[in-house]
Each structure stands twice: as C-alpha cells, then as structure tokens.
Amino acid sequence: MTSTGEQHDREGRAGPLWWGRPGEAVLDVGLGLASAVECGFEGVGLAREAGVPTAVGVVFAVLVGATLVVRRRWPITVVLVGIAVTPAAIGFLLALVGLYTLAASEVPRRITMTLASMSFVGTFIVMWVRTRAEDELATGFVFTLALFMAIALNVPPVLYGLYMGARRRLLESLQERADSLERELSLLADRAEERAEWARQEERTRIAREMHDVVAHRVSLMVVHAAALQAVALKDPAKAQRNAALVGDMGRQALTELREMLGVLRAPVKAASSEAAVAPSVVPVVPVPSAVAAVAGPVEEGPSLGELHALVGQSRAAGMVVELDVRGEAVAYPVEVEQTAYRVVQEALTNCHKHAPGAEVVVRMAHRGEEVAVQVENGPCDGQAVVPGLPSGGNGLVGMRERVQGLGGVFVAGPTDVGGFRVSAVLPRPAAAGCA
C-alpha cells in the first residue's frame, strides 16, 4: 500500500483523472480488483444468509469491493461503505485500505477519528454477535476475541496511515523549505552580482578619473611647452632648450605615474583571482561601500597637498601667471582627501591651459580646522594669447565633482562676474569624513 489519499487539486500532474502518477492509478485499480474478487467470494455466503439469489449477492459484493478504486478521491465514502457492510462480514481488504487511506489523507483529524471509532465499534459488535451465537463459548472468550479482532482490523491501518500522512507532510515541508532556501540563495547571488557589478563600474570610473588626471594634465603642459618651443626655437635657442627639457621631464613624470597606476591595477586582479579560487559558492551580501573597497583595494599612495607648490610651478614654467595662496595651519589628512584636493587643483589648472590661455590664475587653499577648501579661479582670457588647441572630453568637471562628493564634500564650478571661471571644493576634516 502506498500513502497519499490526497483530495486537493492535482493540476499539472501526469496521472489520469485524480491520480497524481500513472503508477497510483495502476495500484488503485489493482486493489479495487482484488477487493472486488474477495467480496465476490464472500457474496456467495451473504446471498445464502440473506435468502437472495446468489448472483444478486455476488454482484452487490463486487460493487462494494470495487469502490476501493476511488479511495484517493473520496476516502470518506470508501470508509462509510466499509462500515455499512460490516454486519455482512465482507470487504476486509476494503476496510483496511480505506481506513489507512483516510488516516493518511488531508481529511480533518476529528473526522478521521470519528469514522475510525465507528468502524471499531461496528467490528466489535459484529464479532461479538457472530461469536456469541456459539453457545459453548464462554462470555469472556467471546469478549476478548471480539476486542482483538476490532483492534486488529482498525488500529494498525489507522496508526500506519497517520504515520505516513505525517511523514508525507514533513517531506513536503522540507521540500518547500529547500525550494524557499534555493530561491533566497538565488536572490542573494543576484544581489551580490549586482553589487559586484556596481563596484566594478565604480572602480572603472575611478580608474578613468585617475587616467584623465594623470594624462590630461601632463600632456596638456607638454603641448603648451611644445607650442612655446616651436615659437622660440629660432629666436631664443636657450629658452627653447629649457622648454625641451621641461617637455622631457613632464613626459617622464607622466610615464612614471602611468606605470604606478598600472602596477596598482595588476595587483588587485591577482589577489581577486586567488580569492575567487577559494571563495565559497554562496556569496554574502555586503554593504555597497564594502563591496567597492573589496574591488578597489587599499588607496594607493599618490600626490599630496604638499606637492601643490611643484604643481603650480609647472604651470608657471609653461608661461601661466599663477598665484598660490595658502591659509590656516596644515594638518595631516587621509590619503584620499589629499589626493582629491590635489586632483581638483590639477584638473582646474589643466582647464585653464586649455580654455583660458594667458589668463591670470589664483589658487587658494584654506585649512579651517573642520574642513579643507581649495579654489582655482582664472580671470578673463587674453585674446592675443596663443591657443594650443587642446582636445577636451568634457569629463573634467564631472570627475572632480564625483571625487569630492564621494568623500562627502561640496563642489561648485561656474563662471565669474568678470568673465573668468571658478572651481571650488570643500572637503570635510578626517573625523567628519569617517576616515581618520
């Protein structure tokens, strides 16, 4: 006998009619035939006792036994039929399988116990009456025999059915939990992949900003010096020689910074590869900043605020009139804060070379205790100055804004009233930035 006794909807199942699988249909039809054959033989005695034609008794008994075919669909009906024919002493297989199916089904427990009790009492009474007919048997023996038969025909199938029903429900619950866990793991993996992709995109943006800062500034100065070199090559060979030396120095500096950046980029890739090889299959969900830090790795050493004098000196050497104004007492800032402030000034000076050749530029930096502020402002462009014709990708201001806002700072850029342009950035002090 197999458990199920399912009454609920079976949409999407592979079996015919109400059966979940073809095997269930074959089993129930086989049990129905066996029960019909058993009841058919018992119907002969029933017809003799009832005083009806044998064919009528046999047909009635066969129909009663055949009801076992619908045990999964209507278990209550099958049990009621078994209780109804208990006085006729037929359908033992029908009663056993019917009680088992009812106990294993999703029928409410109170209904199951009520019908099982009715079957128990009916079996006990029938056995008592039939055995009592034998005058030579003692009353105690008759009672014991009737009680034993009632227990044997009713208790085992009910207990086994309850066990199989509880086991099936437990397996279904475990399967649901497994499916739910699989869905949750899938969602976690999708979210982790989204976060990782976001972190990779952020890192690509950061790398693009670094490449822009390194290349754009150095190359812009090289173009300016090359233009000056071309203009004075014949008139002032000594100055042309100095400009050529400056171009060479700036090219070497650009190459050095590029090599350092490429070295930093290669190291995390190897580390990430080795970590991925031993990482577990389930990726934990981490906060976005942690994901970015995991991809980007530690902040590499780079330019600092102490190098602003050298940066301004390079622009002066290119012919730009630059004034540097530093106010307040300098304090030690985290690497990312100093790099951001330096890159803002660097990019602003690069834009002055590109878009405002010949204009006077003022670079201001103020240490205010709780924050550090930098500002680069150029005056109106000198119309007679030589325009180098440097290309512009339009990403300079965007990159500066992203850098500053990424540290919780404020960035403002726009034209001045006198026709110049001003770039301002305010970065929080280390404690406020959360990176002391």
Image: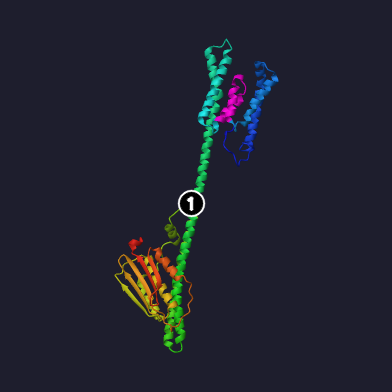
Farthest residue to the top: give it: 136
Closer to the camera, 273 or 404? 404
Image: 231 above or below 325 = below
User: Can residue 90 be seen at all in this image of the molecule?
Assistant: yes
Closer to the camera, 87 or 140? 87
Residue under numbered circle 1: 188
Percent position of residue 160, x then y:
54, 29
Question: Does residue 52 appear to the left or right of 302 in the view shown?
Answer: right
Label 1: element kind: helix
Percent position of residue 284, x then y:
46, 52
Closer to the camera, 24 or 274? 24
Farthest residue to the left: give it: 329
Quarter of the image that includes the N terminus: top right
Question: Within the magenta stretch, is there residue 264?
Answer: no
Q: Residues within 10 Å of mark 1 (few under 14, many from 20)?
A: some
Question: Within the magenta stretch, is there residue 96?
Answer: yes
Percent position of residue 11, x then y:
60, 41
Percent position of residue 109, x then y:
51, 30
Image: 211 above or below 178 = below
User: Can residue 436 be seen at all in this image of the molecule?
Assistant: no
Which stretch is magenta?
A: 75-102
Quarter of the image that includes the C terminus: bottom left
Magenta span main SS: helix
Rendered residue at 54%/23% (across/down)? 118
Image: 119 above or below 135 = below
Q: The residue under label 1 is which amino acid type? A: Leu
Image: 179 above or below 77 = below
